[in-house]
Image (tube, rainbow, N blue to C red):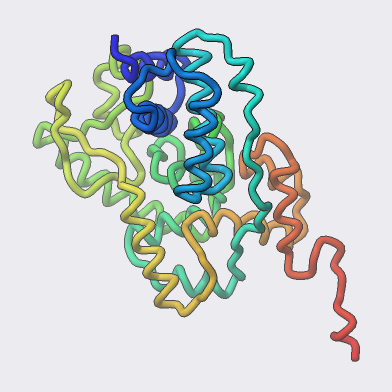
Amino acid sequence: MKLLARVRQALRLRHYSWRTEQVYVGWIRRFVRFSAMRHPADLGPADVTRCLSSLAEGRRVSASTQNQALGALLFLYREVLGLGVGWLSGLVRAHGPRRLPCVLTRDEVRAVLAQLRGTERLVAGILYGSGLRLFEALELRVKDIDFERGEIVVRRGKGAKDRVTILADGQKLALRRHLELLRVDHERDVAAGAGRVELPTALGVKYPSASVEWVWQWVFPAGRVHLNAKSGERRRHRLHPTAVQRAFRQAVRSSGITKPASCHTLRHSFATHLLETGYDIRTVQELLGHRDVRTTMMYTHVLNRGRLAVRSPADVL
C-alpha cells in the first residue's frame, strides 16, 4: 500500500476527523516533496528539523502551523511507520505569542447582524447566541435542536466531544420558520427521488432508510442536490462554510467596524459577554466545550472593566 494510503487508513482506524486527515496528509506530502521524494523511513532528525526550519524561515508560518506540521510527522513515524520516535519527540516545539481574542461589543454585534440576510444571518445569530464554532453550527441536524428545553446538542465537536449549549430565545422564531420551509423542500426532494443526507459512521448501513428521515436532515443544507459517486444517491450536503465567511466579512466592512473580526469572533463575544453579565467561568467553560478552564480564562483579559474591575485614575479627575 502506498504511503499516503497507509496514513489515511491509520487516521480512519483511530477515528480522526476528516479535516485532521486532510491536514495531516497534506503536511506529510509536503515533507516527502521537500526531501526530494525520499521515503520518510530513510530520513532522520536532521531532515525533519530542516523541513520545520524552512517553514519558519522561508515561509514565515506561525508557531501553531509549525507545530501542526510536527504533529503530522509524529503521527507518521509513530503510528504509520512504527519507528522509534525518541529523537522526533525531542525536537523543539515553536512557541508563539499569546494573543488576545478579537471581541465585538454588543452594539457592534448588532450592527454586523443587521447587515446579514437569510441563512447567513441565521447562522451568525446561532454562533453568537449559542457560542458555537462555525463547523459545529453547519453540522447541526434537525434532531439536535430542542425548542422546548431551549437547548442545542453539539455532536462530535472539537476533540470528538458532545456537549449541550443554550438556544437563545431570540433565535427560536426565525429558526422554526427556517425549518418549516426546509421541511417543505425536503418533502419535495423525497418525492423527486432525492432527499438523502450523509450519516455519521456506519449508521447508513445499520439503518438504510434513516438518511431520508426528516430528523437527520441538515439544519443548514446546501442549495443544490449532488449525486454521490459511490452510492448513486441524490443527496444534499450541508452549507459550505465559505458562504457564511464571505457574507460575514462583507457585513463587517459594511458596518464600518475596523476590528479584524471573523465568524469565530462571535464565539469569543458570546463568552466575553456572558462573563460581563456575571455568569461564573465554569458555566461558560461547559457551554463552550473547553477541556481546561484555563482556556476559558483568556476571556477575563478582554472584559470591558478588566479582570479586577479596575477603574482608571483618569476617570476621577
Q: Give left or right: position of 32 versus 291.
A: left
Front one among 187 and 28: 28
Residue extending farthest to the left is 192
Question: In percent of the image, x 25 and y 17: which residue is there?
Answer: 208
Task: Please state which of residues 235 and 60 is positioned toward the viewer in this rendering.
Answer: 60
Q: In this view, does 21 lie above or below 306?
A: above
Please identify the quarter of the rendering in which residue 19 is found: top left
Relative to 176, is 309 on the left or the right? right
Quadrant the N terminus occupies: top left
Q: Quadrant of residue 39?
A: top left
| Position in image of residue 77 (x %, y %) | 50, 16
Q: Which residue is drawn at 62% across and 44% down?
A: 288
Q: Which residue is drawn at 64% across and 48% down?
A: 96
| The C terminus, quarter of image | bottom right
Q: Nearer the viewer, residue 213 or 45?
A: 45
Q: Identify the residue shown where x is 75% and y is 53%.
A: 279
Horizontal and vertical percent for residue 18? 39, 29
Answer yes or no: is residue 156 visible: yes
